[in-house]
Structures are given as C-alpha cells and as structure tokens.
C-alpha cells in the first residue's frame, strides 16, 4: 500500500528547506522499502511551521513541523507513515487552531491539492463555478459578481462587478482580461501563494471574467521576482488548454477565451494598472492620465478588465456557491473574506483568511502571537510600504475599508507588518519618501520632486534644524503629493509619513532618547 505524503513547493517553504526535506524523505523511504507518494502542494500559510510534512491516514492528514533534514530518520521511525508520535507531531492539520479559526473561501484548496494536477483541482470542486456561469447569460454573470459585493483586493477596493459591467457594455470586437500579479508590497505574499498553490482557480476566474464581459484573451502580469509562480501558472495554463477549458471553444460552450503569462521587470510602479498596461504593450512602465479609463481604452487601446489575483480567484466561489452566501460574510461595504498576510517581527507569520470585521489587535496579538522576539509591539503598518503606521491605541480598528479610511489608513493588499519598540519611526518615514523617489516613474512633479525633497526635509527635522518650520513644510509637501500625484505611488506616500509624525512625534527630534533607553 502506498502512503501519500504532502510537502509544499511554495517559495516560502523552499526558502527554509522544503526541497531538501522532500528529497531526503524520498531517499530514506526508498532505502527502507517503503512505498510513498510525495505530493508537492502549495503552502497552508502557517509559515512558522514550514517545512510542514503531512501524511494521509485513515483519520485525516497528520502534520509534522517544522521539519529539518536531520529529522527524517526519526520521523520514519515514529512511524511517520502511520501518523505516529514524535516531538514534531502537530496532530490533524485541519484541527490546528490557526486554521480552524479561518474562513477559507479563496484559499480553500491551497496547501491541499496538487497545483499541477487538473484532475485534483476538479476533484476538490474546481470548475463548478465556470460550469454554472456557462449556463447563464453573460449579463447575469456580471450581476452575480456585482451582487456579491466583491471589491478589488489589490488595494483600491473598487467594486469588481462595476468594472466588469462597464467593459461588458462597451461595443468592441476585441476586449481583454488583465490580471495584476505584480505583488510588490512589503509583507504581502497572497498572490504568490495562490498562483503557486492553486493556479487553476485563477485561470477559472479569468475565464469567467472573459465570458461575462466578452473578452477573448487574457494576460497574467507576474513580477519577475516570482519565478516559481510564473512556472506554476504556465504549467497550469497548458494543462487547462489541453483539457479543453481554454481556446476557441471553452468546454464546448462556443465561447472563445485563451490566456498567457507575461513577466514584469521589477518596477514597483507597474503595480498601478495603467503603468502595467504600458509595460504589457512593451513600453516603459509609466502611469497614464485618467480618463480615459482602461475599461474603455485599455490594453492596445481596447476595453480591458484589470483585476488583482485575489479578486479573480474569488469569482469561482461566488459563481459556484452564489452571491448571497459570499455577501453574508464581512461588515458594512466590505463583503466576503480577506486573505490577511501577517509579517515582520511576529511570532506566527503567515496567511490568515477571515471575514472583514476582525480587529487589528486580534490579528496582531491573538492570531499573530505578538512579536517573535517577545518585545512589545509599537507599530503596525498595514497596506504595504505606502500604508499608514498604526500605534497600539488604534488596535481596536476593524479590518474594513471604510474603518481604515476613517483612521487615515489603508487596507491595501492586506499586508500587516509588525514592529517592536526599538523601531525608529522617523527613519521609517524617511524610508517611505526615499522609496517613492527611487520607484517613481517620473511622469508627475509631485511624486518625482516631492519625494526627493521629502527626504531632505525629514533629514533636517531629524537633525533638529528649524524643526517646527520643517514639520510645517513636510505637512504641506505631503498634502501636495496626496492630492496632486497622478497615481497612488505619490498619492499614498504621505500615509506612512504623516502617520509616523502624528502618532510617534517623539521620534522626530535630534536625539532619539527613547531608543537609547531601550538599548
């Protein structure tokens, strides 16, 4: 009898030795004459337990982790294949509190299925959403997405269905679906996880989008820093095409839809939708003025739907289970679930998918377990390098687009980066301006010049040179960048700067006494 063992090939797991563990386990099992089938999955998102090894038993999948190469022999002695006792034994993976507390809709299959097996995807409910969509009129598909309340998961939070409806109503023989997989925010990895761990769900979502809007071709724009995601997507697209679910006659429906992967070249600004289009067309990534909107004049001048990975990957669930079921999760105008990524100095870092409404404090203290080194949490940045810094006094803020906006913050792509009490917030503010100066496409003056001047002004504040006057200049500069920049790169840079200045003013003096005391 052959026993199935599951080990992730997710980039995060590979970084801590998953490949070496898988190789050592296969070799050791072979030498012992044990029949094993090692399945390389995506990650469950419990990164502090990677490499996580799971073994299929009659009771379910038993987990062990984090496993090192040196643990392989003792695991096989346990015996591993029977789910035996071992110091690294975690029990049934599905019963782990960190997983049981989640509401996994978008990531329901991630870490469970073989991401390179179309039959495995189908066996776990894959393509049920497309099957239901094909039985509906395109207009009805669009309205189902509208009624679900799904909003863009890339950062802006714009209603996904409204974008689709706009493109669907345009009259043009050629339309496009573009998936923005240029995941460049610090502390974010959900896009990469879904592409590496469940790529078929993204393909299914893009196919549904194409049929709903009349688009016959799609592109997945993936950042070049994600070679494993690029490989996984290309393998999956090939398998789906060979399976008849892509091409001139999708699933025998008469609808034509095909797609391909394009790799970016490492520009952060290409995460902005119009810069991404410029890059896709072979030009330098540079923001376009709007209007016209991409929904009217987008890729190659044609009507284009541009959605984030998570937005498109959520569509199959909505179509399969119904808009009402998805809409029942969440709060206010933030419906459904959000895959939240916990990173930085945190004990339990990883991906936690839950309904909107959970508080920031619950995420950091309860689910994340506080800091990894045991020091007090001082600040949390939500929404990438251009997100605001929240102090502990704002930890009662619910994870909700409007609630974060009211607190002068951004949910962004759902990345939560934790800092302990040794962080210098003036340096963090300076980094935001410096980051913007480096990554600016240069098209608009507030972003290009404002960020460079911002670094200089913060340096003067930190040196205690005309501190009060320079703080006034910094506030005015941030206001100009926020409302005068062409895109979110310059427009959002003031968030980390002003939040650091507002909530941590003591760090903007000439001598950071608090840090000296901490040391």
Image (tube, helix red, strand yellow):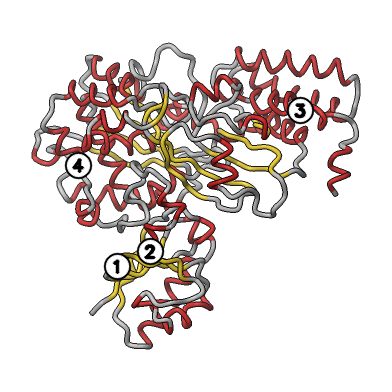
- Dots 2 and 1: beta carbons under 8 Å? yes
Give the quarter of the image for residue 43: bottom left
Distance from disc 4 to disc 1, alpha carbons, whole Å, reads: 37 Å
Give the quarter of the image for residue 424: top right
**x, y percent for residue 447:** 64, 21
Is 219 in front, or is 47? Answer: 47
Residue at the disc numbered 1: 59
Distance from disc 4 to disc 2, alpha carbons, whole Å, reads: 37 Å
- Dots 3 and 4: beta carbons under 8 Å? no
Is 84 in front, or is 346? Answer: 84
Residue 313 vertical position relative to residue 193 in the rendered view, above or below: above
Which badge, 4 or 1, comes first in the chain's sequence? 1
Distance from disc 3 to disc 1, alpha carbons, whole Å, reads: 58 Å
Badge 1 density bin: few <14, some 14–19, many ≥20, Cα 10 Å = few
Badge 2 density bin: few <14, some 14–19, many ≥20, Cα 10 Å = some
Instruction: Name the secondary structure under disc 2.
Output: strand
Distance from disc 3 to disc 2, alpha carbons, whole Å, reads: 51 Å
Residue at the disc numbered 4: 246
**x, y percent for residue 327:** 32, 28
Residue at the disc numbered 3: 455
Instruction: Name the secondary structure under disc 1.
Output: loop
**x, y percent for residue 84:** 40, 77
- Dots 3 and 2: beta carbons under 8 Å? no
Which badge, 4 or 2, comes first in the chain's sequence? 2
**4 vs 2, front mark:** 2
Which badge, 3 or 2, comes first in the chain's sequence? 2
Residue placed at 69% from the left, 43% from the top? 377
Residue at the disc numbered 2: 92
Q: Left or right? Give the position of 128 relative to 326.
A: left
């Amino acid at each position: 009898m052959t026993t199935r063992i599951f080990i992730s090939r997710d980039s995060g797991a590979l970084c801590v030795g998953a490949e070496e563990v898988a190789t050592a386990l296969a070799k050791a099992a072979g030498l012992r004459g044990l029949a094993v089938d090692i399945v390389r999955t995506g990650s469950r998102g419990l990164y502090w337990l990677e490499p996580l090894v799971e073994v299929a038993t009659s009771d379910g999948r038993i987990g062990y982790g984090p496993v090192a190469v040196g643990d392989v022999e003792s695991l096989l002695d346990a015996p591993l294949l029977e789910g035996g006792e071992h110091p690294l034994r975690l029990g049934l993976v599905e019963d782990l509190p960190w997983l049981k507390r989640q509401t996994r809709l978008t990531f329901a299959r991630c870490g469970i299925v073989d991401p390179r097996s179309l039959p495995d995807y189908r066996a776990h409910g894959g393509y049920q959403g497309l099957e239901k969509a094909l039985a509906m009129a395109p207009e009805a598909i669009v309205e189902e997405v509208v009624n679900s309340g799904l909003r863009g998961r890339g950062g802006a939070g714009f209603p996904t269905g409204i974008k689709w409806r706009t493109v669907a109503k345009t009259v043009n023989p050629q339309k496009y679906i573009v998936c923005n997989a240029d995941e460049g925010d610090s502390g974010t990895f959900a896009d990469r996880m879904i592409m590496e761990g469940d790529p078929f769900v993204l393909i299914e979502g893009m196919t549904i989008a194409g049929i709903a809007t009349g688009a016959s071709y799609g592109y997945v724009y993936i950042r070049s820093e994600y070679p494993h995601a690029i490989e996984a997507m290309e393998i999956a697209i090939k398998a789906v095409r060979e399976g008849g679910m892509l091409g001139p006659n999708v699933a025998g429906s008469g609808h034509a839809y095909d797609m391909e992967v394009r790799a970016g070249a490492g520009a952060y600004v290409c995460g902005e939708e119009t810069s991404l289009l410029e890059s896709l067309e072979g030009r330098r990534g540079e923001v376009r003025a709007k209007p016209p909107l991409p929904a009217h004049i987008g890729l190659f001048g044609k009507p284009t739907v541009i959605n984030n990975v998570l937005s498109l990957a959520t569509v199959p669930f909505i179509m399969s289970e119904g808009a009402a079921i998805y809409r029942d999760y969440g709060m206010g105008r933030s419906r459904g679930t959000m895959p939240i990524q916990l990173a930085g100095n945190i004990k339990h870092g990883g991906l936690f998918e839950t309904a909107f409404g959970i508080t920031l404090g619950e995420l950091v203290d309860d689910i994340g377990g506080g800091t990894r080194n045991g020091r007090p949490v001082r600040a949390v940045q939500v929404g990438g390098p251009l997100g605001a810094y929240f102090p502990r006094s704002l930890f009662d803020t619910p994870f909700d687009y409007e609630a974060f906006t009211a607190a002068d913050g951004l949910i962004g792509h759902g990345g939560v980066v934790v800092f302990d009490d040794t962080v210098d917030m003036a340096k963090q503010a300076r980094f935001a301006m410096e980051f913007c100066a480096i990554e600016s496409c240069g098209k608009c003056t507030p972003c290009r010049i404002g960020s460079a001047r911002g670094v200089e002004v913060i340096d003067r504040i930190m040196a205690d040179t005309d501190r009060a006057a320079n703080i006034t200049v910094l506030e005015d500069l941030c206001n100009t960048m926020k409302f005068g920049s062409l895109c979110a790169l310059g427009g959002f840079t003031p968030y980390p700067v002003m939040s650091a200045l507002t909530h941590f003013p003591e760090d903007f003096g000439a001598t950071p006494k608090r840090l000296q005391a901490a040391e």
